[in-house]
Image: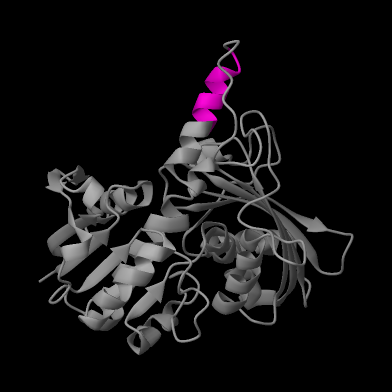
Amino acid sequence: MGYRVVVVGATGNVGREMLNILAERQFPVDEIAVLASRKSLGTEVSFGDSTLKTRDLDAFDFTGWDMALFAVGSEATRQYAPRAAEAGCVVIDNSSLYRYEPDVPLIVPEVNPQAVHDYARRNIIANPNCSTAQMVVALKPLHDRARIRRVVVSTYQSVSGAGKEAIDELWDQTKGMYVPGQEVAPKKFTKQIAFNVIPHIDVFLDDGSTREEWKMVAETKKIVDPAIKVTATCVRVPVFVGHSEAINIEFEDFLDEDEAREILRQAPGILVVDKREDGGYVTPVECVGDYATFISRIRQDSTVENGLNLWCVSDNLRKGAALNAVQIAELLGREVLKKG
């Protein structure tokens, strides 16, 4: 016996990826509904070997459905997620709307699976920000061993994290650089993204940080440990898919780089590729389509007490969004609903 599953926002990048991953991982589905706004009504999407037509989100009745994976913006989620939750359908939400609500669990299954039991307070589970998700997968096993005091992280985030328009803008600007008179002005981004990097993701806050940077701080504390101090600089780079992070960690206790490497090799969801030679590390292009969070460049930092550096790469459309949501659905089914 399987589950009745809804994918909301099925025509977007993340929604389509959710469908791909549900099929790839053979999630126990008895029935699946794919929903979109009325402007996308009837659009066909793939689910394994099947082709499904989208249904109208506004008119959909969530009664009798087990879980709904939401891949729409905060405003649409604000309108439709409570409707699904009140109908008894557990919402797994990819937007930022519920992440910081104290009665909504924020889950990365490799890190805090026990939090899934808190879903019943609102019938909603939140999926973390893409940059946070991959980082905490790496931090948690190290934290369990040596207790993390402080994290300094610089991100190198692909344009797919900003949606299809952002992907198109990078593509069009790149082509335009080679054709005189066909240059493409920035629309989605504040500055040219082709052959450039932009140290600005989301809105600026009063303290000079951006909301993307604040998310990494707040979410790490909620998912891993509120005592961890985090400071982040988030940068958009001209990469289509795959986020990278340079992470500097200060521990309460000494942790040798060789032991850290072995801990990460044994940790769920992580693949260590760390050879001190040309090409002995993973780059964003190599992580696309993979489930793993890749860790490279593990080394001591002698400038601080008990310091360690590492390089972290992951497919942001997968672990940063769709895969994590499906893993939450698997966890929910296995630990709570127990139908599949």
**Would you say the magenta stretch is mainly helix, strand or loop?**
helix
Whole-percent x and y of residue 151? 73, 66
- Asked whether residue 94 is in view, the answer is no
Q: Is residue 172 magenta?
A: yes
Residue depicted at 25% across the width and 75% down the height:
84
Residue depicted at 29% across the width and 70% down the height:
80
Q: Could you say which quadrant of the image residue 86 lies in? A: bottom left
Say which of 208 and 113 sits in front. Answer: 208
- Asked whether residue 96 is in view, the answer is yes
Q: Is residue 33 magenta?
A: no
Say which of 36 and 233 sits in front. Answer: 36
Q: How is the image coloured?
A: one colour
Q: Could you say which quadrant of the image residue 75 lies in? A: bottom left
Looking at the image, the residue that sits furthest to the right is: 303
Q: Which residues are magenta?
A: 170-178
Whole-percent x and y of residue 259? 68, 64
- In the rendered view, tell whether residue 319 sits above or below residue 81: above
- In the rendered view, tell whether residue 221 sits above or below residue 294: below
Residue depicted at 63% across the width and 39% down the height:
237
Say which of 66 and 259 sits in front. Answer: 66
